[in-house]
C-alpha cells in the first residue's frame, strides 16, 4: 500500500473537519496542543495557545489576501 502524501492527508483531515462545528474544531486544536506538549501544560494554557494560534492564522490569511489584491 502506497503512503499518502501530505496533501492527501490534509485533504482527508479537512473533509472530516468540515462536518464539525466551530466549537468542536476549537476543542480539537486545544486537544492537539495538549498532546503536542504531552499534557505538561494546563488546560488554560492550551486554550491560550489555541487562541494565539487562531489569531496568528487570521493575520496570515488577512495579509495573504491583501497581497493578492
Image (spheres, rainbow, N blue to C red):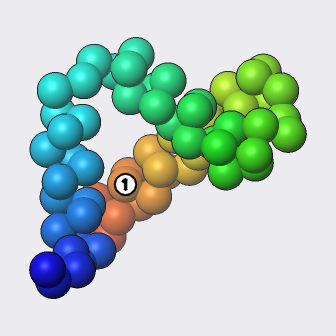
Where's the N terminus, which quadrant?
A: bottom left
Tell whether 3 sits left or right of 64.
left
Tell whether 16 sits left or right of 22.
left
Tell whether 28 sits left or right of 47.
left
Q: Is residue 48 visible?
A: no
Q: Which of 67 and 14 is in front in this view?
A: 14
- Estimate the x, y position of residue 18 in percent, counting from the top left: 17, 34
Q: Quadrant of residue 34?
A: top right
Q: What element carries label 1?
A: helix
Q: Quadrant of residue 64?
A: bottom left
- Estimate the x, y position of residue 66 in percent, counting from the top left: 32, 61
Residue 52, placed above or below residue 1: above
Task: Give the residue at x 45% y 58%.
Answer: 60
Task: Give the residue at x 78% y 21%.
Answer: 44
Q: Which residue lies furthest to the bottom in this view?
A: 2
Task: Give the residue at x 19% y 39%.
Answer: 16
Total marks in image: 1
Disc 1 designates what residue?
A: 61
Task: Give the residue at x 40% y 16%.
Answer: 23
Q: Which residue lies furthest to the front in this view?
A: 1
- Packing grade of label 1 (10 A; few <14, some 14-19, many >=20) is few
- Estimate the x, y position of residue 11 in percent, counting from the top left: 17, 58
Amino acid at each position: 500500500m502506497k503512503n499518502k502524501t501530505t496533501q492527501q492527508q490534509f485533504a482527508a483531515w479537512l473533509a472530516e473537519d468540515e462536518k464539525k462545528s466551530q466549537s468542536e474544531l476549537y476543542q480539537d486544536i486545544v486537544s492537539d496542543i495538549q498532546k503536542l506538549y504531552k499534557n505538561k501544560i494546563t488546560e488554560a494554557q492550551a486554550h491560550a495557545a489555541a487562541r494565539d494560534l487562531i489569531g496568528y492564522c487570521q493575520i496570515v490569511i488577512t495579509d495573504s489576501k491583501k497581497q493578492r489584491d
